[in-house]
Image (tube, rainbow, N blue to C red):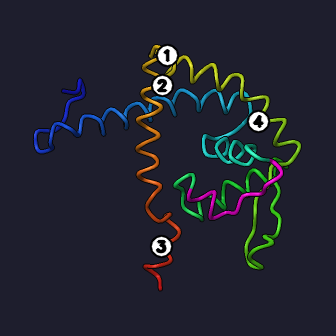
Amino acid sequence: MSDHAVPPALPPEFGVYFALLEVSALVQHGVEGQLRRDGGLSFVQFQILAICGEDPSSPRSMTDLADRLVHSKSGLTYQVDRLEARGLVARVPSPQDERGVNVTLSPKGSTVLQRVLPGHLEVVRDVLVDALDDAERDELTRLLGRVVQHMRSRPPRSASRAARNA
């Protein structure tokens, strides 16, 4: 049984859902101040830079970013606009789609990402990682990876929206 209170109308196994929501909110709250202080970034802007920084030689499509971040395309466009205005990312034409636009990390964006990462790691360790021993971290990573794999096995949000609009 979970330590999280579950409303009586819901099955007790929803404790995992409420625990996940609370952990997610607390981690996000913990890192947002550090990201603003060290890089002038919102949480979503940091995620965009981090995804683009995974492989700086491979630009990311706006659709891929929106699906990965589970963010609306209009909201993502606004955040990319702000990052581009600061010179942290650049938009480049998509070689696969003449109407498409890809996002790439700029050298300045890479510098900002490198500046915020040490403090970011420190906060994440403090609010999440250090609460678990090595075996628990490995198990939680395994379990959450399984959930992500299950959720990502479904069509991406952009594909389901396109099917509804057809």
Which mark is first along the chain, 4 or 1? Answer: 4
In the depicted view, which residue is nearer to us: 138 or 88? 138
Res. 134 mark: 1
Q: Are marks 1 and 2 in contact (CB under 8 Å)?
A: yes
Q: What secondary structure is marked by label 1?
A: helix
Quadrant of res 60: bottom right
Q: Nearer the viewer, residue 75 or 147?
A: 147
Distance, label 1 to label 2, CA atoms, is: 6 Å
In three-dimensional space, the C-alpha distance between marks 3 and 2, rounded to whole angstroms, equals 35 Å
How many callouts does the rendering have?
A: 4
Locate residue 58, reporting x and y percent.
79, 55
**Which residues fall within the magenta stretch?**
56-67
- Using the image, tell me which numbered label, if any, was put on residue 161: 3
Question: What type is the residue that disc 1 sits on?
Answer: Asp
Q: Quadrant of residue 116?
A: top right
User: Residue visible at 57% across and 53% down?
Assistant: 68
Q: Residue at x 61, y 28 (%)?
A: 33
Which residue is at the far right?
107
Q: Please rate how many residues cluster around mark 4, counting C-alpha atoms within 10 Å: few if below 14, some from 14 to 19, many from 20.
A: many
- Give x and y (percent) for residue 83: 75, 50
Q: Residues within 10 Å of mark 1 (few under 14, many from 20)?
A: few
Q: Is residue 92 magenta?
A: no
Report the front residue among 57 and 119: 57
Q: Nearer the viewer, mark 4 or mark 2?
A: 2
**Few, some or many C-alpha atoms within 10 Å of disc 2 (few <14, some 14-19, many ≥20)?**
few
Residue at left offset 45%, top offset 16%: 132
* Residue for badge 4: 113
- Disc on the earlier residue, 3 or 2: 2
Residue located beneath label 2 in the image: 138
